[in-house]
Image (cartoon, rainbow, N blue to C red):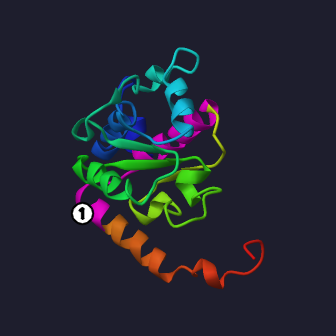
Amino acid sequence: MGLEEKLPSGFLLTTVEGVAGYARKNSMWTVTFGLACCAIEMMSTGGANYDMGRFGMEVFRPSPRQADLMIVAGRVSQKMAPILRQVYDQMPNPKWVISMGACASSGGMFNNYAIVQGVDHIVPVDIYLPGCPPRPEQLLDAILKLHTKVQDTKFGSNRAAEVAELEREALLATPTSEMKGLLR
């Protein structure tokens, strides 16, 4: 016997976090940070064949102050890293990052001094998208997974507690250098 059974039909029960999460996930704007061949696939995702407009993302924003999602597509050089961080810092909170392609996620085949070996050394990454280059369908799938994450994001003191818990878990996690099995 809950409150739902006592209300007449037509009433909707939810939380403020639920409504705000729904609004955020359906009005996500992206800032373009296309650096290499993955950027061509990212641009084609915005075209008519894949139509990101059905997710409320039809326009790639040229200004970071109007965006809440950064898609880093391609390899990041050491010279580009500070600019990437500056663009990320200019984005309003809450902000999310998708690392698109093997080069952005891990440096790809460019294991040298000039290329950053993973964009997560510069900005926190929410979704890693593998491939060289990943197909537009994969990017749409990553965006849908990010939508689920965005809709479940907490607010205020709940968000601060969630961030503290995630940081504590990250500090307690086993370093990859000590992991055994498929990693070695």
- Residue at the limit of the structure toward the bottom, as seen here: 178
Asked whether, in this view, residue 85 is left or right of residue 130, the answer is left
Q: Does residue 18 appear in this view? A: yes
Looking at the image, which residue is at 42% across and 60% down?
78
Question: Any magenta on residue 157?
Answer: yes
Residue name at image x 34 percent, y 72 percent: 164
Q: Position of residue 54 (x, y in %)?
A: 47, 21
- Quick one: 146 or 80, which is closer to the camera? 80
- Quarter in which the C terminus is drawn: bottom right
Magenta span includes 8: no
* Camera sees residue 14: no
Q: Circle 1 is placed at which residue position?
A: 157
Horizontal side of residue 142 vs 150, given as left or right: right
Percent position of residue 80, x then y: 38, 53
Dot 1: what SS? helix
Q: Is residue 86 above or below residue 46?
A: below
Q: Residue 46 in the image: x percent, y percent?
A: 48, 24
Decide which of 16, 151 is in the foreground and name it: 151
Task: Report the predominant secondary structure element of the magenta stretch.
Answer: helix
Between 171 and 37, the one nearer to me in the picture = 37
Q: Which residues are magenta?
A: 136-160
Which residue extends farthest top? Answer: 48
- In this rendering, the answer to whether 64 lies above or below 61 is below
Indicate whether 89 appears above or below 70: below
Q: How many marks?
A: 1
Quarter location, residue 66: top left
Q: Amino acid at mark 1?
A: Ser
Could you tell me residue 32's position as x and y percent? 39, 36
